Image (cartoon, grey):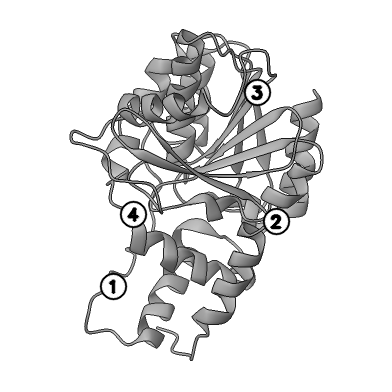
Amino acid sequence: MTVKKFDFKKHHKDLSKIESKSEKLFIKSKDSNVCWRIWGKGNPIIFLHGGYGSWAHWIKQALPFSKNHKVLIPDMPGFGESDDLSLPHNPKKIASNLADTLEALISPYDNTIICGFSFGGLISGHLSYELIQRKFIPKKLILIGPGGLGAKRGDMKTMIARHSKMSEEEIYGAHKTNLEILMIHDSKKVDDFSVHIQKQNTDAHRIKSRPISATDTLAKILERQDVPLYVIWGEKDASVGVYLEDRMAILRKVNKNVRFHVEYNIGHWIMYENEKKFNKLLEDIIQD
């Protein structure tokens, strides 16, 4: 395990600088109080973070996309600064509580785009369906390495658990290693800022997302809607491994018009590992 002195305060300041440019709102829902951060004006893009995550999964997209869009990023219920969600935790309840709050933030007449990462991709499918029931029809649904398809998980090394007897340097080393195992393929891109985000995110999560991601709940909810669907993976996504074709087959079955993109030599957290490629790709999909 790598041991080094880590300046969390510096990176907290960098994160706060981007957050400070947003409008930060707490909006009550049926079962929670959801924290939203909003940048810019225009047609809305809703970005949903992954499991053990927060709004900061989209740290490299918030400002660039706010130049031409209204960017809305929540901490989903049970994550980050949002309140806990009552048991049992399930995708429908998370999506319903997000939709409750979105009724105050978007209009049925907006060309709203939903873009979800990993566990947030799974929730995005449910959120899209929930909004459709409320007559807020999304223009596009874009999923980044989504869970919930019922496909096998890629084989990977065991991640390092953190515990109270670890020093701050040992905790840093554990998070860095875990990012290299699951999230980012190019270890050179695992920088101190990403480690700070990872630590902050994992410290604040309360919902166990992995058991939900292991189900086929996303596949089932996509069968019940016909929103234009785009799915993106990094070629080296460790959560997918050798089972990419299985995921494509499942998605083709539930939406015959689904469009895929696989970005060469990039891992799971594609929009952090290479934000230039990802942001260009996402803008192309938005304009498609």
> Which residue appears at 31% of the width and 44% of the height?
210
Residue shown at 51% from the left, 27% from the top: 102
Label 4 amino acid?
Answer: His
Q: Residues within 10 Å of mark 2 (few under 14, many from 20)?
A: some
* Relative vertical location of residue 33 with respect to residue 14 in this rendering, above or below: above
Q: CA distance from mark 3 to mark 2?
A: 25 Å
Q: Earlier in the sequence, mark 1 or mark 4?
A: 1
Q: Earlier in the sequence, mark 3 or mark 1?
A: 3
Determine the residue positioned at 48% across, 91% down: 5
Can you identify the residue that label 4 sits on? 205
Report which residue position mark 2 lands on. Answer: 274
Mark identifier at residue 140: none
Residue under label 3, please give it.
112
Q: Mark 1 sits on what residue? A: 162
Determine whether, in the image, residue 240 is placed left or right of residue 233.
Answer: left
Q: Amino acid at mark 1?
A: Arg
Q: Nearer the viewer, residue 213 or 53?
A: 53
